[in-house]
Amino acid sequence: DGYRNTNQVSDDYRYQDGNYDTPNDGYYRGGDEPAQDEDAQSDVTEGHDEDDEVYEGEYQGIPHPDDIKEKQKKRAPAVDDEYRDRADLMAERMEDEEQLAHQYENIIEECGHGRFQWTLFFVLGLALMADGVEVFVVGFVLPSAEKDMCLSSSNKGMLGLIVYLGMMVGAVLLGGLADKLGRRQCLIISLAINAAFAFLSSFVQGYGFFLFCRLISGLGIGGTLPIVFAYFSEFLSREKRGEHLSWLCMFWMIGGIYASAMAWSIIPHYGWGFSMGTKYHFHSWRVFVLVCALPCIASLVALKFMPESPRFLLEIGKHDEAWMILKQVHDTNMRAKGEPERVFTVSYIKTPKQVDEFIEIQSSTGTWYQRWLVRITTTLKQVWDNVLYCLTAQYRMNTLMLAVVWFTMALSYYGLIVWFPDMIRYFQDEAYESRVKIFDEEEVSHFTFNFTLENQIHRNGEYRNDKFIGMKFKEVRFEDSLFEDCYFEDVRSSETFFENCTIISTVFYNTDLYEHKFINCRLINSTFMKEKEGCHIDFEEDNDFLIYLVSFLGSLSVLPGNIISALLMDKIGRIKMIGGSMLISAVCCFFLFFGNSESAMIGWQCLFCGASIAAWNALDVITVELYPTDKRATAFGILNGLCKFGAILGNSIFSSFVGITKVVPILLASSALVGGGLLALRLPETREQVLM
């Protein structure tokens, strides 16, 4: 003990409470003074109370023995922490977190709800809007992209699912990182990834690269949902949380409306673009992809001016930073209310005991990539530990029940959202086929066709010395026909085929009548010259306008449900909201049996979307409230990732029954909603609970 280092010595000579502390090293003891004479004692203390007595050593910088003992008691727990059991430290941390939860609730109430929260509301709303846009983008561009990139049916299906796959991975990964690196930082990373790859995808020409860009773009935007709700909830008091998180959900609806309106106004204008030679084409659907990245970019810029969540900072022991942000929130709201003189009265906030150990390699040790490798692997391990924590005994049952509710909701909702437009297209195709014109045994010679032929079937016809110049074939079939000494030039076709035809001495110049369009045909002395290269958008589809309108109305129909859920969320509770909404949505599914026309399907879609949105909003709220701060975004990310997996299954299953039967999709969706709704009623109510 005699060989004490300078740090200990300097710590001992600290100025505390007006006294300079000296080391308790045995050279001086305040209690070892020789006994004084009784008369002398009475003279010294005469006229003085004991409370007013001044200790002699105070002016010499010598500590009082009682101060030394108190100081040693305070030091003792800190010294022993490294020898204490981890379970004891975790128990102490949980006790600290409970104290912090109640203190933080009081602090947020003191800060009030005002300008700061509304500013953050719109900033995070733009991020949520970007998430809503991402879901619709691929569906809107597929009809154009499939012709622009020569997509097969399997390629189209993969492009439709790849975004959900990216969002599933992004929700789990970025949601977990938000509990370790911070809400604001991870949200900026998430939006930056989405904006960069969405922008890049609008310029790439190849299918493979486009698919990759949409995958990474989906991965980026997948992290926004869990982070946004965790972030915003930590600035809200208990009495405001349910309502304002529900209002925030409206931005997802606004994203759908925005995407539908932009698709409707941009994609049909095929000339809105440019070409560079014959290989590079920038058509209107690519302009639409660019425009859809704007909400993400706007949110990304605005986030630069917003602070980190103070609740997260307190969780990792950054007391001073959290205090400054809370003071900023308080002062901003008080100035907006016209009360700038109001003082932020909080001076100290409880911070939980830090038990996580983060391995850090010093700059003098190892190479830079070794240091980064350790940082990354350590952070990922912590994320994985958080994932496992959500399945511990304390949270296992809630996590499993929420997982079932999220999955059943996603399976039915996203499955039907894809099924509705497909069924409308099916009804349109049926109506289109019913108007087909059939020509039998027609004979045409020395005639020039320079106009569009559409929705026709020509059987057993004979065409001699005819010219087909600068024309279009749309949904035209030639069956068992003869073409002799004919000339085709600059011909464009869509869904046009020649079956069992005989083609003699005929020239095809600059056409897109490729080999696969001639089925069991005999080509005798015929020539194909300068075939059209690449893929072309041949016709403006009138059906597309209706699809945009359907998506627009479907997004708009959730507005009443959003308003009702926001107003009633804190009155009737989250559990009743989820259960009631899912059961009402299940009833709406049965009415789909009566949807035998386009208008009926549109009406039932709007009713279903309006009824189900309340369940989505309540699910978001209860997921935020059921988990502690250091696990909140991780748990939300896991459940949201499972939701996207349900969306992938729903899309695949429901679309396979289009044109075959309505019974399976309707029964599957309604039974999933009933099962999930009944299970949701067993979840704990959280509206009176403070955020842990």
Image: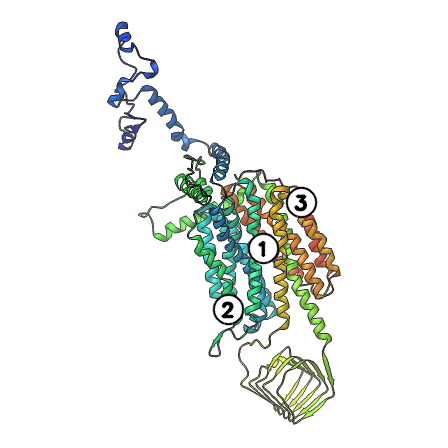
Q: Earlier in the sequence, mark 1 or mark 2?
A: 2
Q: Earlier in the sequence, mark 3 or mark 2?
A: 2
Which residue is rendered at x = 73% and y = 75% of the image? 434
Query: Percent from the top left, x then y, of residue 392?
Result: 56, 40
Nearest to the eye among marks 3 and 2: give it.
2
Q: Is residue 26 positioned above or below 287 on the image?
A: above
Q: Which residue is mark 2?
A: 287
Query: Percent from the top left, x then y, of residue 635?
Result: 54, 46
Whether tag 1 and tag 2 are in contact, CB under 8 A, the answer is no
Q: Is residue 182 positioned above or below 300 on the image?
A: above
Q: Earlier in the sequence, mark 1 or mark 3?
A: 1
Residue 419 — which label?
none
Q: Which residue is mark 1?
A: 644
Front position in the image: 418 or 521 = 418
Query: How many numbered discs sit on the rendered protein?
Result: 3
Mark 1: secondary structure: helix
Is disc 3 surrounded by few (<14), some (14 to 19) or many (20+) residues within 10 Å?
some
Which residue is rendered at x = 53% and y = 56% of the image? 129
Distance between the alpha carbons at the discs numbered 3 and 2: 45 Å
Query: Percent from the top left, x then y, of residue 333?
Result: 46, 44
Front position in the image: 497 or 102 = 102
Distance between the alpha carbons at the discs numbered 1 and 2: 27 Å
Say what amino acid the circle numbered 2 marks.
Val
Say what amino acid the circle numbered 1 marks.
Lys
Which residue is rendered at x = 58% and y = 56% of the image? 253
Say what amino acid the circle numbered 3 marks.
Leu
Residue 679 — which label?
3
Is disc 1 surrounded by few (<14), some (14 to 19) or many (20+) residues within 10 Å?
many
- In the image, 33: left or right of 388? left
Query: Percent from the top left, x then y, of residue 366?
Result: 34, 49
Find residue 81 and report its image quarter: top left
Mark 2: secondary structure: helix
